[in-house]
Image (cartoon, rainbow, N blue to C red):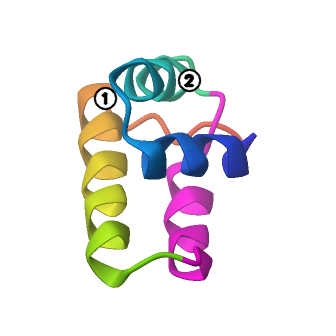
C-alpha cells in the first residue's frame, strides 16, 4: 500500500492526492514508512522534496496519526 501511495504522490494528480489524504486520515499508511521510502524513489531530488512535504502536510492535517508500521 505504501508503494501505491508514493506513486500517487509522485503523479500529483488531484484525485491521487485526495485518495492519499483519505488513506492517511484513516490510518492505513505509516508516516514513518512513507518518509523512509521516499529517498529510494527513482525521481529527481526536487520531486522527492515535494512528496516529503505532501506527506508532512497530510499527516499534520490528519492529526499526526501514524497508522500501521
18 up-or-down from 7: above or below: above
User: In x, y percent, where is residue 1?
Assistant: 75, 39
59 up-or-down from 38: above or below: above
Disc 2 from disc 1: Cα separation: 13 Å
User: In x, y percent, where is residue 27?
Assistant: 58, 27
Task: Rate crowding at label 2 as few (under 14), some (14 to 19) or many (20 or more) other CA atoms within 10 Å.
Answer: some
Q: Quadrant of residue 32?
A: bottom right
Residue located at (41% from left, 24% from top): 21
Residue located at (48% from left, 75% from top): 43
2 and 1 marks in contact (CB < 8 Å): no
Please state if 67 lies on the left or on the right of 47 as rendered: right
Say what secondary structure mark 1 lies in. loop
- Asked if residue 1 is among those painted magenta in the image, a careful observer would answer no
The circle drawn on residue 42 is none
User: In x, y percent, where is residue 65?
Assistant: 46, 34
Q: Nearer the viewer, residue 8 or 2?
A: 8
Please state if 33 lies on the left or on the right of 50 as rendered: right
Task: Rate crowding at label 1 as few (under 14), some (14 to 19) or many (20 or more) other CA atoms within 10 Å.
Answer: few
Say what secondary structure mark 2 lies in. helix
Would you name the residue on which mark 1 appears?
63
The circle drawn on residue 23 is 2
Tell me which numbered mark, 2 or 1, is placed earlier along the sequence: 2
Q: Which residues are magenta?
A: 28-42
Residue located at (70% from left, 51% from top): 3
Amino acid at each position: 500500500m505504501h508503494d501505491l501511495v508514493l506513486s500517487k504522490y509522485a503523479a500529483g494528480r488531484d484525485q491521487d492526492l485526495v485518495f492519499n489524504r483519505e488513506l492517511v486520515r484513516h490510518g492505513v499508511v505509516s508516516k514513518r514508512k512513507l518518509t523512509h521510502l521516499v529517498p529510494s524513489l527513482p525521481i529527481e531530488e526536487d520531486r522527492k522534496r515535494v512528496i516529503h512535504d505532501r506527506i508532512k502536510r497530510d499527516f499534520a492535517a490528519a492529526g499526526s496519526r501514524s497508522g500501521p508500521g
